[in-house]
Image: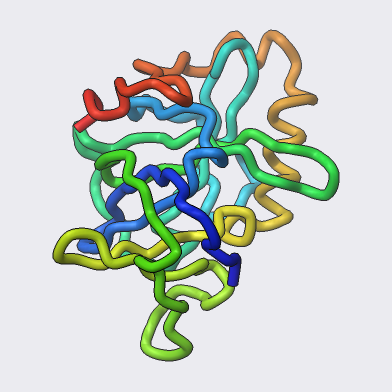
Amino acid sequence: MVEVNQTNEYITFTLGEGEYAIEVTSIESILEYTKLTKLPGTDETVKGVLNLRGKALPVVDIRTILNIEEKEITNNTSIIVMLIKSGDKIITIGGLVDSVKEVIEITPEMVQGAPKVGTRIKGDFISGIAKHKEHFIIILDINKVISEEQTAIAEDGNLLLPDDVKDELPISGTEFEHGSNDVLEVL
């Protein structure tokens, strides 16, 4: 479990009926959903790639990774562009979520440990559970949620795709940069 030992800002998002959070420092930007180009030979968690500023950005389905039933893509579906630690590198990878909600502050007093039983989500994926207003938010350790295999695809997708292949990828939709209050416009 990652310690939440100081007040931090988190982006909250939904997957099914649950609300989840990732530290803002692990997020580069948020994109509106756009059609993805499927990569052959990848596992079911990798939904495809899109063209983000001239690079192929692999997109994984956070629902599938967390063992949450699939849902249709809607107008609220978003892609969170995340910065993932892989060894001594930082890898950029997109995470598909049902909707992005808001940026909130979470203090250590708000956080409880992850439950040991009764969840379909692997315990090491969860940093803690925060009580916010009248509900609970599951805080994810995104560096554990995204596997080594998925970061390897991200490294290959970002570094090794030929330019003619990158040119054929869908260009990302509206983008909201890290630190921007525009995240709320995605709602």
The single residue placed furthest to the right in the displayed view is: 88
Q: Residue at x 22, y 36 (%)?
A: 76
Whole-percent x and y of residue 5? 55, 62
Q: Is residue 2 left or right of residue 156?
A: left
Residue drawn at the location 28% of the way across and 46% of the way down: 98
Q: Residue at x 80, y 39 (%)?
A: 89
Residue at the far bottom in the pictured view:
117
31 left or right of 131 in image = right
Residue 19, compared with residue 121, is above or below; it is above
Q: Quadrant of the C terminus?
A: top left
> Splitting the image into 4 quarters, where does residue 99 fall?
top left
The residue under the point 39% across, 68% down is 109
Q: Nearer the viewer, residue 116 or 77?
A: 116
The image quarter in which residue 93 lies: top right
Q: Position of residue 158 (x, y in %)?
A: 71, 26
1 or 76: nearer the viewer: 1
Which quadrant is the N terminus positioned in? bottom right
Q: Is residue 146 shown left or right of residue 18?
A: right
Image location (x, y in percent) of residue 44: 52, 55
Q: Position of residue 20 (x, y in %)?
A: 35, 57
